Image (cartoon, coloured by chain):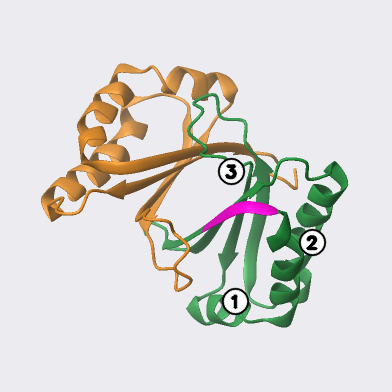
Chain colours: A orange, B green
Amino acid sequence: MSELRHVVLFGFKEGTSAEDIRKVEEGFAALPSKIDGIKEFEWGTNVSIENKNQGFSHCFLVTFEDEAARDAYIPHPAHQDFVGVVRPLLTGSLVLDYWSRPE
Amino acid sequence: MSELRHVVLFGFKEGTSAEDIRKVEEGFAALPSKIDGIKEFEWGTNVSIENKNQGFSHCFLVTFEDEAARDAYIPHPAHQDFVGVVRPLLTGSLVLDYWSRPE
């Protein structure tokens, strides 16, 4: 069955404290309990040995129930509050959504 | 249970033919049948409405049995052959591996 995946990569500014990074990890992990329509959620930090992560240290993988859930998530106040907290800490972020294949 | 995920993003050069892109998609999708230790494989093309995909159009998500499988995958001839075919077509690629949390 095809799933709607939402891939989010974060890279943190040099000097960001471990505590601030932990708050971001916990803040993201709290979103599924605040916003409806999130079917699966997982995340982790880069352990690749290929050195092709382009400065991104964190990957969050959100699976939505459907497109409507994804569309409601983006402007949701809990999500926007989180974005406001995390944005000043980041060198960059990357977002790519896809419907998984094979179906 | 924690899983070892291997996230690969591709962006194609402007003018890359649909046929060449299809060959890359099929070539990647064929790797799990050629290389041991791949537990799950899925992929898809960007449908995000946030415009934060930084030129990447394709996401491939490979789940390895363990770290040894990941380490064997990278230099595997079938993988290296595939890399040789795809590299000239790309503006860029990004690779990030993570152990999924929560465990």
Check disc 3 and report its element: helix, strand or loop: loop
Q: Residue B68, how many percent across, how many down?
A: 52, 82
Q: Nearer the viewer, residue B2 or B25?
A: B25
Do discs 2 and 3 belong to a common subunit? yes
Residue name at image x 19 percent, y 54 percent: A14
Asked whether B93 falls inside the magenta stretch, the response is yes
Amino acid residing under circle 3: Phe
Mark 3 belongs to which subunit? B
Looking at the rendered image, the disc whose residue lies closer to the viewer, 2 or 3, is 3
Task: Identify the chain of the residue marked 2, using the numbered disc in the image.
Answer: B
- Which comes sooner in the sequence, label 1 or label 3? 3
Q: Position of residue B39 (x, y in %)?
A: 63, 67
In what quadrant of the picture does the N terminus of chain B appear? bottom left
Residue B100 position within the rendered picture, expressed as x and y whole percent measured from the top left? 42, 58
Tag in front: 1 or 3: 3
Q: Quadrant of the C terminus of chain B?
A: bottom left
Q: Residue B27 — which label?
A: 2
Tell me the amino acid under the disc marked 2: Gly
